[in-house]
Image (tube, rainbow, N blue to C red):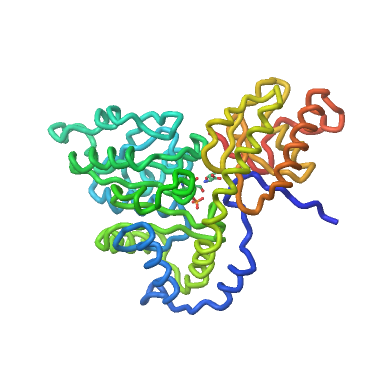
């Protein structure tokens, strides 16, 4: 019998439920590039209403949602975007805003809570008088929750403050809201309130919500019209996407209510990891579904730990050369969390003993890894 895999690599790993598959099979579809796929149109309207924006656009991925949004705001050569130095757009999207969009990134340090100091944001805004020499600031990007800061939530008040800065300087505000529903549930604040100050938001359906594919961009009607053209330019115009939107609608219906449980399980996992003296875990800082921890013992590398865990059907990914990331999602049960903790404890013991069983493992990268 194949052991059940406990997959803590990311919340992108969930498999579609039977309800999603049934909805996909029965979806009412049409060519979305030629007209509007009826299921896509309904789902886009649902997302626009949920986020308090005029319109929405389904796109294949969160990376494309961010790229299209930045390019739609920064459609003049020499544009610059202010964003966090550990933001997903800056770190994990192949520099697409520059290589494809010709947009210049101006990073501001992300604080451990996912914010950027507002005075540093203001200081990063270019003086229009210097346009002969400098790029022109046109956009500020936030990320809520902030993945590299451990899934931290940005408050509505902080977002409003950055929105006011953008407006007073004639700039636009985009939120990478890949996990905005996690932030909404963790803060107890509706999504539309959290993103009120934003001109555009990208929302991932394929993360904690558990849809198999896709993201949605929301914003004004005029913005979405521009975004639709850019989506096509980038090859993201798809045909019968009602198949995907039907699953996304089921995910929205069935999974938002489970996110609080993901956060509870993440906290429980962090509390358990904290008991392992070779780890440094700030369990109090766990706000949503992510647990980051440092490995203090030089004899245990994240890669080796992942390899040993994989032998026990627990999948994880290093976060850096000295830290690990576990991500919870609704397909991880409480008993899976207990099993994973037991496996981590045993793996640490064995790695410390230098057990020959694992000597054949090299310090190479695991099958699944990302790090920065
Ligand atoms: C914060 C954040 N934004 C954007 C993305 C990109 O989404 P996708 O993987 O669907 O391109 C991710 C990760 O997947 C993410 O964690
Ligand atoms: C790796 C990264 O791109 C992805 N968003 C994740 O959090 O797993």
Q: Position of residue 280 (x, y in %)?
A: 62, 24
Q: Residue at 49% of width from left, 34% of height from top?
A: 149
Task: Return the x and y of residue 173 as percentages of the image width and height.
Answer: 29, 45
Quarter of the picture containing the N terminus is: bottom right
Q: Position of residue 210 (x, y in %)?
A: 56, 57
Residue 39 can be seen in this image: yes
Residue depicted at x 48% and y 68%: 245
Vertical side of 36 occupied by 254: above or below:
above
Query: In the orientation shown, which residue stands out farthest toward the left?
Result: 129
Q: Nearer the viewer, residue 26 or 124?
A: 26
> Which residue does the image show at 45% across and 57% down from the upper left?
215
Q: Quadrant of residue 276?
A: top right
Q: Could you say which quadrant of the image residue 125 lies in?
A: top left
Residue 227 vs 126, above or below: the answer is below
Q: Is 265 left or right of 357, judged from the image as shown?
A: left
Q: Give the percent coordinates (x, y) of residue 24.
A: 56, 72
Res 109 → quadrant: top left
Quadrant hosting ligand 2? top right
Residue 94 appears anywhere in the view: no
User: Along the line of sight, which residue is nearer the eye, 18 or 68?
Assistant: 18
């Amino acid at each position: 019998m194949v052991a059940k895999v406990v997959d803590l690599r990311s919340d992108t790993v969930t498999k579609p439920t039977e309800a999603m598959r049934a909805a996909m099979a029965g979806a009412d579809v049409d060519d979305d590039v030629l007209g509007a796929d009826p299921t896509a149109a309904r789902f886009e309207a649902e997302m626009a209403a949920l986020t308090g924006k005029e319109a929405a656009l389904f796109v294949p991925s969160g990376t494309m949602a961010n790229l299209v949004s930045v390019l739609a705001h920064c459609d003049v050569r020499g544009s610059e975007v202010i964003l966090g130095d550990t933001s997903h757009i800056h770190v994990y999207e192949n520099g697409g805003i520059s290589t494809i969009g010709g947009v210049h990134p101006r990073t501001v340090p992300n604080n451990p809570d996912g914010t950027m100091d507002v005075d540093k944001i203001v200081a990063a805004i270019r003086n229009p008088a210097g346009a002969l020499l400098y790029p022109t600031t046109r956009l500020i990007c936030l990320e809520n929750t902030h993945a590299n800061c451990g899934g931290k939530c940005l408050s509505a008040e902080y977002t409003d403050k950055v929105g006011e800065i953008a407006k007073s300087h004639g700039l636009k505000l985009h939120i990478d809201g890949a996990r905005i529903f996690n932030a909404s549930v963790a803060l107890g604040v509706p999504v539309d309130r959290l993103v009120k100050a934003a001109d555009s938001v990208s929302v991932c359906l394929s993360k904690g919500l558990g849809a198999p594919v896709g993201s949605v961009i929301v914003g004004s009607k005029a913005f979405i019209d521009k975004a639709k053209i850019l989506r096509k330019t980038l090859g993201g115009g798809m045909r019968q996407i009602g198949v995907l939107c039907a699953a996304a609608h089921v995910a929205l219906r069935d999974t938002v209510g489970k996110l609080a449980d993901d956060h509870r399980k993440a906290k429980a996992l962090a509390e358990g990891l904290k008991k392992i003296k070779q780890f440094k875990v700030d369990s109090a800082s766990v706000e949503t579904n992510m647990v980051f921890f440092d490995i203090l013992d030089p004899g245990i590398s994240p890669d080796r730990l992942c390899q040993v865990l994989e032998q026990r059907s627990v999948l994880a990914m290093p976060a850096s050369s000295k830290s690990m990331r576990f991500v919870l999602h609704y397909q991880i049960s409480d008993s899976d969390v207990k099993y994973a903790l037991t496996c981590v404890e045993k793996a640490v013991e064995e790695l410390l003993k230098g057990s020959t069983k694992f000597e054949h493992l090299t310090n190479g990268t695991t099958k699944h890894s990302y790090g920065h």
